[in-house]
Image (cartoon, grey):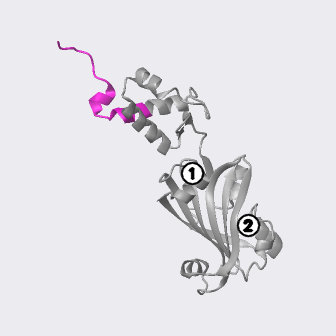
């Protein structure tokens, strides 16, 4: 028996059902119906309410997870994520504080070593030049957001590793060595998190990440810092600003 019922907009446009469901759930999150930190209804209930299969619903939730709207726990279900933390290129500690959150750092390791070819190129020195190397987990309100692997020219900041390595190292450099940090440059890449970084950041293995490779220069033109920072792309957005008409 035929029907004159008008098909849904998604049917008319050929939009896949999982994208339609993702859009509908995103709207409900943005409206505040599902608050940050709150669990979504059980998958079984959502499937009945939305009239879709569990496979379709899970594809929709996957889209929202990639967007940073939700995060999934294998045993407890799916939860609404807090809004991404927006950071500008600069000091992690200062940027997190500017966002109204509390910055933190957990030191994994720190040592003095000769620069390998990559680090030497990053710092603009010859291979074998003495550098300080350290890796830290950076947190915002105790939430892990980034793994920082950083290298400093030991001749420009002698004894750096003897100081406080749990706060802003830029502030440490300014205070202890009276250096003026004149400019910084960065290259941004989209990466896949490996097992180690996924574990540190509390993310699923092979989840998406943002890799920021930074160089920081003092006013003499020398590069004092070379860093490779890896962020959770579902929890951080990086804001890049530059002047246009003043160039």
Residue 218, given in percent of the width and then of the height, sits at 70, 76
224 in relation to 166, above or below: below
> Horizontal and vertical percent for residue 131?
67, 79
Question: Which one is in front, 31 or 133?
Answer: 133
Q: Is residue 239 visible?
A: no
Disc 2 crowd rating (10 Å Cα; few below 14, some 14-19, many 20+) is: some
Q: How many marks?
A: 2
Q: Which of disc 2 and disc 1 is earlier in sequence?
A: 2
Specify the quadrant that holds the N terminus. top left
Element marked by disc 2: helix
Left or right: residue 67 versus residue 175 is left
* Residue 186 to residue 29: above or below: below
Q: Quadrant of the C terminus?
A: bottom right
Figure quadrant of residue 161: bottom right
- Front residue (pair 236, 143): 143
**What is the residue that sits farthest to the left in this orientation?**
1
The answer to whether the residues at label 1 and label 2 have Cβ atoms under 8 Å apart is no
Q: Quadrant of residue 171?
A: bottom right
Residue ID for mark 1: 237
Residue 212 horizontal side relative to residue 164, left or right:
left
Q: Indicate whether residue 241 is drawn in magenta.
A: no
Give the number of the disc on residue 170. 2
- Assess disc 1: are there few (<14), some (14-19) or many (≥20) residues with their C-alpha within 10 Å of its C-alpha: some
Q: Residue at x 37, y 26 (%)?
A: 52
Report the residue at 53% width, 43% height from top: 68
**Magenta segment:** 1-22
Secondary element at image label 1: strand
Compared to 125, does 149 lie above or below? above
Q: Residue, x 60% and y 87% (percent of image)? A: 126
Q: Is residue 95 visible?
A: yes
In percent of width and height, residue 198 lies at: 55, 54
Residue 158 lies in quadrant = bottom right
């Amino acid at each position: 028996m035929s029907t004159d019922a008008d098909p849904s907009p998604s049917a008319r446009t050929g939009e896949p059902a999982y994208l339609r469901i993702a859009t509908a759930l995103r709207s409900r999150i943005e409206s505040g119906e599902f608050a940050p930190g709150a669990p979504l209804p059980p998958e079984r209930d959502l499937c009945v309410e939305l009239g879709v299969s569990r496979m379709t619903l899970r594809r929709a939730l996957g889209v929202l997870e990639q967007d940073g709207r939700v995060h999934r726990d294998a045993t407890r279900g799916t939860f609404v994520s807090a809004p991404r933390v927006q950071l500008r290129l600069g000091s992690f500690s200062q940027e997190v504080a500017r966002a109204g959150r509390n910055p933190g750092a957990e030191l994994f390791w720190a040592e003095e070593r000769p620069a390998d070819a990559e680090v030497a190129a990053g710092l603009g020195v010859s291979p074998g030049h003495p550098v300080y190397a350290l890796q830290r987990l950076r947190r915002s309100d105790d939430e892990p957001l980034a793994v920082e692997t950083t290298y400093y020219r030991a001749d420009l900041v002698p004894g750096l590793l003897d100081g406080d390595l749990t706060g802003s190292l830029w502030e440490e450099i300014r205070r202890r060595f009276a250096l003026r940090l004149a400019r910084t440059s960065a290259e941004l890449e989209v990466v896949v998190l490996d097992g180690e970084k996924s574990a540190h950041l509390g993310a699923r293995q092979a989840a998406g990440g943002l890799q920021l490779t930074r160089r920081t220069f003092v006013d003499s033109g020398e590069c004092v810092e070379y860093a490779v920072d890896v962020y959770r792309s579902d929890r951080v957005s990086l804001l890049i600003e530059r002047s246009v008409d003043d160039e």
